[in-house]
Image (cartoon, rainbow, N blue to C red):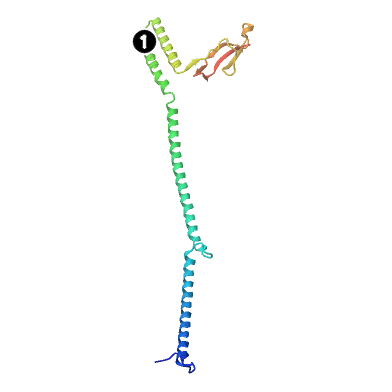
Amino acid sequence: MKLNPFIKRLPNFPFFTRGKKIEHYKQQQKNMEEKDLNTQNDTFNDTLNINADENAAGSTHLNEPVEEENQIQKLQDEINEQKDKYLRLMAEFDNFRRRTAKERLETIQTAGKDVVISLLDVLDDCDRAEKQLQTSDNIELQKEGIQLVFNKIRSTLQSKGVKVMDSINTEFDVEKHEAITEIPAPTEALKGKVLDEVTKGYYLNDKIIRFAKVVVGK
């Protein structure tokens, strides 16, 4: 049996004393090994705690790249969402602009459609009056037919909001009248008033659409 070198160096004490020394040495050696093992375990646990605890000093920077990446992704998603909304809005506006331009063009092209349709009946009466002029020598009958056509034209235009401007014997108004010439007024009361009318003026729904060309007394 090979003895521990420490035991060899022991003096020649009685057996009982030498046994106690050996047991004491073994206990010290065991305590030192346990202490070293506990120290190693504590060091390992501290390392685990440092990596696991995100709030531990010196470990916060480990999570910063992840947080920055999440923030960048969030901002990118918001940018993509706003870009999509912008593209949709531009597409809707472009469709609205095209539709409005088309409707405006159609309105301009057919603005007088109702008036033209209403005048077609008058045109038919004019055709009939023309045939009557060519086939009949009755002057009174021809006059009556022509007068009926004129009355129908006037009534048709009036139904569309057209109204004749009354200018004779009224004060000359630059907002309504266009003076062609001036002539001496027959009376003092007619000075500055409209004495004659070369071309009638007209309203459409109370808005002047043609100025009256008149002769003014001076």
**Which residue does the image show at 47% across and 64% down from the upper left?**
52
Quadrant assignment, res 102: top left
Q: Where residue 108 appears, x then y in whole percent? A: 45, 28
The number of numbered discs placed on residues in the rendered structure image is: 1
The residue at the far bottom in this view is 12
Q: Which one is nearer the viewer's eye here, 177 or 62?
A: 62
Q: Where residue 96 appears, x then y in whole percent? A: 44, 36
Rendered position, 87 above or below 217: below
Quarter of the image with the C terminus in it: top right
Q: Where residue 10 appears, x then y in whole percent? A: 48, 92
Q: Which one is nearer the viewer's eye here, 181 or 92?
A: 92
**Amino acid at pointer 1:** Gln
Quarter of the image with the N terminus in it: bottom left
Rendered position, 4 above or below 117: below
Disc 1, SS: helix
Would residue 215 appear left or right of 85 to someone viewing this image?
right
Q: Residues within 10 Å of mark 1 (few under 14, many from 20)?
A: some
Quadrant assignment, res 190: top right
Would residue 120 appear left or right of 59 to someone viewing this image?
left
The residue at the far left in this view is 135
The residue that mark 1 highlights is 132
Would residue 37 appear left or right of 212 to someone viewing this image?
left
Quadrant assignment, res 26: bottom left
Rendered position, 191 above or below 14: above
**Which residue does the image show at 55% across and 16% down from the upper left?**
213
Q: Which one is nearer the viewer's eye here, 96 or 84?
A: 84
**Which residue does the image show at 48% across and 72% down from the upper left?**
42
Q: Where residue 15 appears, x then y in whole percent? A: 45, 92
